Structure formats: structure tokens, C-alpha cells
Amino acid sequence: MPPDRNPVVRATDATVTASAYVAGAVLVVLMLLTVADVVGRYFFNAPLSGVFDLTQFAVLIMTFLSFAYCAFRGAHVVIEIVYDRLPRGLRFVARRGANAAGAVLFAVIAWRAVVQSVDVRDFNETSQLLLIPYWPFYYVVAFGSVLFAVVLVLKTVMDLPEEGEQ
């Protein structure tokens, strides 16, 4: 069955696309917040309070919610200095091995994020100025990591089209 007709691939595509839209919306909000802060700071001598806290959370959300989309589309930066010199069969093994290793790594990151979120919640850790609790953002890390791991598993077991091939 071609990858584009596989229901798991189609569901993953829809999920990573929705995740990327959320990351994009957060980027737009962060841009507007930063502009408002700069205008307030330099024109009215009244910067917005807590922008640093919100920026940290926004960057975390944008990063972890966009990893899977970039991987699914084959749009991550790849250093091909050695890869292009490998024989075709070894390139196949290297690509699948890297995807499998990445899937394991991000599954571990997701697991540890969930475990750490419990400790962070128990200690009531919050941001410095706005006192936003940290623990919900560990679940964003976990979700994004699991989604990325799923994409890498799919890329390990099947050929998904790379950027420009779709």
C-alpha cells in the first residue's frame, strides 16, 4: 500500500499538520507580543511585564510542536558530506538506523518529561514574573516528542516522501 493511502500515515499527517498550525499561531502571538513590548519600552517607557516568561513558553511550544511536521515532510537540515559518499545500500541502512535511534531518543525524552512534570507540579515550580506553572509545558514536550518519535518510527519502517517529492 502506498504511504499516502495508509490510514496510519494519513492520521499522522493530519496530526503533525495540526500541531504545526498551533506552533505557527504561537509564533504569530509571540511576534505581536514582542512588537507590543518593544513599542511600549521605547516609545512609552512602559515595557510589558512578563514577556520574558511568555517568550520562554512560546519558544518551547513552537519547537516541540514543529519537530514532527518537519520530520514528516523531510524538511530537517541534513548534513550530507559523508552520507552522499556512502554506497546506496549503506545510505539506506544509515537513514533507517538514524530514524530508529531518533525514535528511541525522543520516546525517552517524552517519558522523562512526563516523569519530571510530576516533580515540577509537586514543588509548585512557576515562572519568575507571571507565576505560570511549569508542569503543563512538560506535557507539551512529551506530546511533541511522542509525535516526533511516531514519525521517525514510520520513516524507519516505510518510505515516506521527502520535501519536494510530495
Image: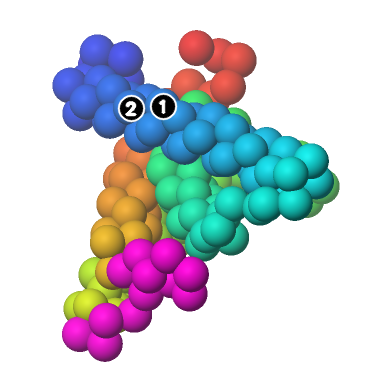
Vertical side of 52 occupied by 166: above or below: above
Question: Disc 2 marks which amino acid?
Answer: Ala
Residue 55 vs residue 119, the one in the foreground: 55
Residue 39 vs residue 74, the one in the foreground: 39
Q: Position of residue 121 (x, y in %)?
A: 23, 78
Residue ID at (27%, 61%): 136
- Label 2, on which residue? 18
- Label 1, on which residue? 21
Dominant secondary structure, magenta = loop
Secondary structure found at label 2: helix
Q: Position of residue 10 (x, y in %)?
A: 25, 21
Residue 9 vs residue 132, the one in the foreground: 132
Residue 154: say if magenta: no
The reply to whether callout 2 and callout 1 are in contact (CB within 8 Å) is yes
- Magenta segment: 122-133
* Left or right position of 138 against 66: left
